[in-house]
Image (tube, rainbow, N blue to C red):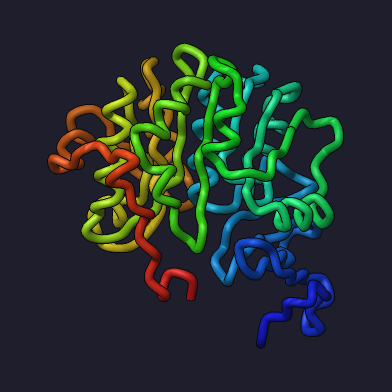
Amino acid sequence: MGKSRSGRRRQADAEAVVESVDGGIAELVPDRDRARARTLLIDGAPQSHVDLDDPAHLSFEYQRRLGHVVDLVAPPGRPVHAVHLGGGAFTLARYVAATRPRSTQQVVERDAALVRLVRRELPLDPNARIRVRSTDAREGLAKVPDGWADLVITDVFSGARTPAHLTSTEFLDDIRRVLKPGGTHAANLTDGPPLTHLRGQIATAAARFGQLALIADPAVLRGKRFGNAVLVASDAPLPVAELTRRAASDPHPARVEHGRALTDFTGGAVPVTDRAAVASPAPPPSVFR
């Protein structure tokens, strides 16, 4: 079936919405098992899943892993200040609002047309303290006050690739600036064999943060397939044991690497600077089939 750029609902499925946005063709596809849930796709690539009736439900593997980080960033239920670089359908912001009421959040999503679509079709809870900026991630981050955030989540993709300027030590310097002492940064990364990008991102984070942990499917860590990995960084000790327990008990179990094993995994990779930065590799076509 061809994709319509008209913004009209598809004839084949009266509930699915297809609309042209700045980043390509956005689709909001109904979930057959959840009445008010939708999956967001951009140019056919799944981006996020939202259930308006249950915003604490995280369907995608990588979002569940980010959810574990949210759960452990502060005592259960305590409101936090969170920055989300990359908005998508605002899945993680909704999750924070549902699990930590009275949290204050800032979402930075460059695609203004996508923001309008999501706000219209999947409206945010009007009581949630979520502010959305339609600008580049680094430009939006620059507007966040020093020491404001307990948590910064980076989940930015353009054409299924993380832009180069969001992979460098200079980018992490600004994340450190906005974090409170002991605050946490979590990044959704994607890579496949030979994992050059992932190793470089770990080395880059290690150059700016004292504590790291990586959550990923074992097959991805072994370089057997392309996939997601969540890199967690802080200057405070990380809850590695609890992250490990939660990741292992997921429907699709993941492994947590940290300490010497994570250092060895980098294989001598060096930190990435703005001058040397490149976008993350494009996923092979088979990933979204």
Locate residue 122 relative to residue 233 in the image: left or right: right
At horizontal 24% and vertical 58% (from top left) the residue drawn is 223
> In the depicted view, which residue is nearer to us: 3 or 37?
3
Instruction: Tell me: 170 left or right of 270.
Output: right
Residue 153 x %, y %: 52, 35
In which quarter of the view is residue 23 placed?
A: bottom right
| 53 versus 121 height, above or below | above
Where residue 259 appears, x then y in whole percent?
23, 27
Q: Position of residue 212 (x, y in %)?
A: 33, 28
Residue at screen point 72% across, 43% down: 55
The quadrant of the picture occupied by the N terminus is bottom right
Residue 31 seen from this side: yes
Residue at the image point whose x is 44% and y is 51% from the top: 163
Which residue appears at 48% of the width and 41% of the height? 65
Q: Position of residue 245 (x, y in %)?
A: 41, 33
Q: Could one spot residue 75 in this view of the protein?
A: no
Number of marks drawn: 0
- In the rendered image, the residue lying farthest to the front is 275
Q: Quadrant of residue 77?
A: top right
